[in-house]
Image (cartoon, coloured by chain):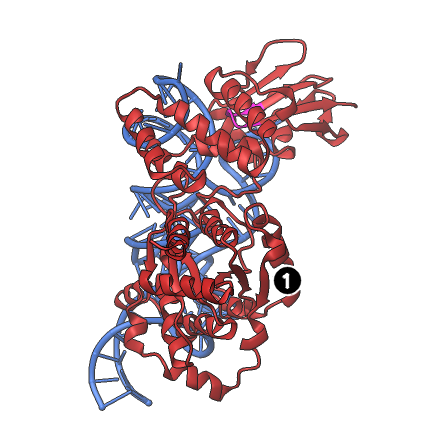
Chain colours: A red, B blue
Amino acid sequence: MTTMEQSIERQLELIRRNTVELIPEDELREKIKKAIDDDKPLRVKLGLDPNRPDIHLGHTVVLQKLRDFQDLGHQIILIVGDFTGFIGDPSGRDSERTAIDWDTVRANAETYFDQAAKIIDYEKAEVRYNSEWLKPLNFMDVLALAKSFTVHRMLERDDFEKRYKEGTPISIMEFLYPLAQAYDSVAIEADIELGGTDQRFNLLVGRTIQERYGQEPQCLVIMPLIEGTDGDRKMSKSLDNYIGITKNPVDMYGKTMRIPDELIGKWRQLLTLYSHEEREILEASLKDGTMHPMDAKKSLAFDIVKKFHSEEAAQSAQGHFVKVFSQRELPQEENIPVFEITSDLVSEGGARVIDLMAATELAKSKGEARRLIKGGGVYFKPDDGDEDKITDELQTLSQPVNGILRAGKRRVVRLVDKN
RNA sequence: GGGGAGAUGCCCGAGUGGUUAAAGGGAUCAGACUGUAAAUCUGACGGCGGACGCCUACGGUGGUUCGAAUCCACCUCUCCCCA
């Protein structure tokens, strides 16, 4: 094997890590070869949805792959879909709010970049907004674009097919979405595009359209999606089963502890970059009982918090978890938010628990506070005494109210009375 | 262009004049059980007040009625069939 070939294989090896599929691999090899020959980095595209600026652990799998490309010396290009963003998802009821606020989009994008910088080298990334080339297109241009793809192929897409069969509405505009996204690849002359398995179709459209426009089609790097904290469906904001990477350490740790045991290996591999062998060893020891799932998960949670925050934060979050869930004690003082009691919450009799709960974050409403008390999950521990269960929903705490009030294990607040 | 069906709470979905804050399931929250979790079981699950109370809610507007998610009219949106 020549050094050239070795170099190509080395690149491919890193690129292949954790991917579901490279489409097509031999073309990718050629592109890498050419990049080395011409000493010209490949252009690697990732599209972003500016409506959802919060990055969660699921996104980091793709971002990590971008990082891999950067480490190999290639050029990454982040496309902010500000224009496609308002083609958006018309399946939502309130189609009136098509009014797009470009400033908000910019702000969202900034938020995204701040978070993404935890993984990629943002300084070296090329950032483009797709309104740059999509906005100036006139109707003729759109027709030309639309002509290069058929309804039949469009209906091959899983969710379109499903919705079509079910009779759920699909607007023509939605058909334009993959085309617009594909046109992005033309505009920036992408060599490679990344995406999760859910993006496979869109990325493939990019290949077709690029060819129609006389470009060499991009190669696709398809990344796996990870299941969310429910262990069942893919991690996503709308399913509320996600862990945001800016989530505070305690919650990030706690949420990780609550994932199903079966997910440990996969998360290890995709999020903390275990090799395939390491993952197998881990899973084997979990299976034969040499490793307790809780310990494996604690270590996983620790590493995740460490990655997105710091080692100290991970340390503290772990301490919190052990104390609260294993030992069933109150959390460490530094992890309890402090709430100062205002005068409107107290009367001669003292302060009512439900009022306090509603005023703090313990309950969304007084009604919920009542229910929690009825459910037997509310406790108060005065500074000078032991923790006691609140059993009466009308119970008041006599002044001065200094102590720790909690609803369940997770919602805890320190009350400070300065009245 | 013609004909038919439909829009219900976070989601799915029952309900066709009062007994419906609206069955059932999912999601969620709390409790029990687990050295984590899952599974299971129990309870809760619009807001406000101490309760028999009030307010808000069944696509929108306006009616009929003592009383409507339920009937009528119009509007908006969607699906299906025919052309």
Q: Residue at x 48, y 85 (%)?
A: A141
Query: Which residue is nearer to you in this view: A136 or B4?
Result: A136
Q: Residue at x 51, y 63 (%)?
A: A41
Q: Amino acid at mark 1?
A: Arg
Residue A162 point in image, percent of width and height:
28, 63
Extreme residue in the top direction: A385
Count of marks overlaid on the render: 1
Instruction: Tell me, yes or no, whether the highlighted magenta stretch contains residue A204.
Output: no
Residue A174 point in image, percent of width and height:
41, 71
Q: Residue at x 51, y 69 (%)?
A: A84
Q: On the rendered structure, is A359 left or right of B14?
A: right
Tell me if residue A399 comes above or below residue A161 in the rendering: above
Residue A316 point in image, percent of width and height:
58, 24
Tell me if residue A158 comes above or below residue A140 in the rendering: above
Quadrant of the rendering where the C terminus of chain A is positioned: top right
Tell me if residue A153 comes above or below residue A257 in the rendering: below
Inspect this view and state whether residue A368 appears: no
Tell me if residue B54 comes above or below residue A323 in the rendering: below
Residue A189 point in image, percent of width and height:
48, 72
- Reading the image, the residue beneath label 1 is A106
Inspect this view and state whether residue A399 appears: yes
Q: Residue at x 43, y 62 (%)?
A: A193
User: Dot 1: what SS?
Assistant: helix
Magenta-colored span: A406-411
